[in-house]
């Protein structure tokens, strides 16, 4: 049984709490959040300030329950956390063949399909009912939003956010720190640090 502390107590965190409660092999023991001022207990779970994270690193595993890719990364860096401090969370209601690799700290939500030959990096999110087709490669700190579809042999680099209902056609690469807007259809490679919107997706902003 993996004893887990969630970092983050917002909407995304509530979904991950529900996954933990209904999935064998996980036990939620605590929640840390910057909005929590001090330690208290409720319904067998403790709550504490994120400032006190170092008190728990030796006894528990963490999952960062925050949707923003950069915030997840910042929490890890500012607290000097390593891979050994984390575990992945995978909902039981998913289709994931045994050859798929999923990195530590990654969360796979209900209804997700990840097909053979795919690799998911560390501290990423594959959100509700997203489809990751065969031979995809997703980097670290990626967020694939609900109902997004990545067709075959797509590469998604680190810190990319693919919006809800977006579609990415086969053999396409989305480079790091880019955002694909909700409902967009990506038909060609997207440069790094880009915002792409529309059907077909066009880059409208570079940061």
Image (cartoon, rainbow, N blue to C red):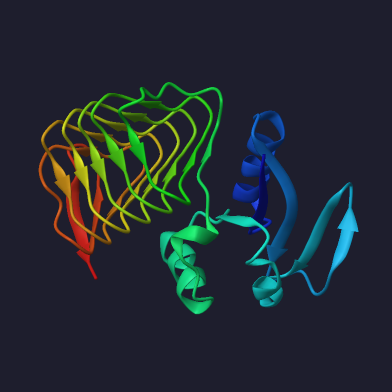
Q: Residue at x 55, y 31 (%)?
A: 91
Report x, y in % for residue 164: 41, 39
Q: Is residue 143 left or right of residue 169?
A: right
Q: Is residue 128 left or right of residue 185?
A: right
Report x, y in % for residue 194: 22, 60
Q: Is residue 50 left or right of residue 91?
A: right
Residue 123, image quadrant: bottom left
Tell me: residue 130, above or below residue 95: below
Residue 152, image quadrant: top left
Q: Nearer the viewer, residue 180 or 76?
A: 76
Number of labelled discs?
A: 0
Quadrant assignment for the N terminus: top right
Q: Is residue 177 left or right of residue 85?
A: left
Q: Residue at x 59, y 56 (%)?
A: 62
Tell me: residue 58, above or below residue 163: below
Report x, y in % for residue 200: 17, 38
Report x, y in % for residue 125: 44, 45
Q: Residue at x 82, y 73 (%)?
A: 38
Quadrant assignment for the C terminus: bottom left
């Amino acid at each position: 049984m993996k004893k887990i502390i969630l970092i983050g107590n917002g909407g995304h965190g509530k979904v991950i709490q529900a996954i933990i409660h209904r999935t064998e092999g996980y036990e939620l023991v605590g929640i840390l959040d910057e909005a929590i001022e001090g330690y208290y207990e409720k319904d067998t779970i403790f709550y504490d300030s994120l400032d006190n994270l170092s008190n728990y690193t030796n006894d528990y595993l963490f999952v960062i329950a925050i949707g923003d890719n950069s915030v997840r990364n910042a929490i890890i860096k500012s607290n000097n956390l390593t891979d050994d401090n984390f575990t992945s969370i995978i909902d039981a209601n998913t289709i994931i063949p045994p050859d798929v690799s999923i990195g530590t700290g990654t969360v796979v939500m209900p209804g997700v399909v990840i097909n053979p030959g795919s690799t998911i990096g560390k501290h990423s999110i594959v959100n509700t009912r997203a489809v990751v087709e065969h031979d995809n490669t997703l980097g670290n700190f990626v967020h694939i939003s609900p109902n997004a579809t990545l067709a075959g042999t797509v590469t998604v680099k680190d810190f990319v956010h693919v919006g809800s209902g977006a579609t990415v056609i086969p053999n396409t690469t989305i480079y790091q720190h880019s955002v694909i807007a909700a409902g967009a259809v990506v038909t060609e490679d997207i440069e790094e640090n880009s915002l792409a919107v529309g059907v077909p997706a066009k880059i409208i902003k570079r940061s």
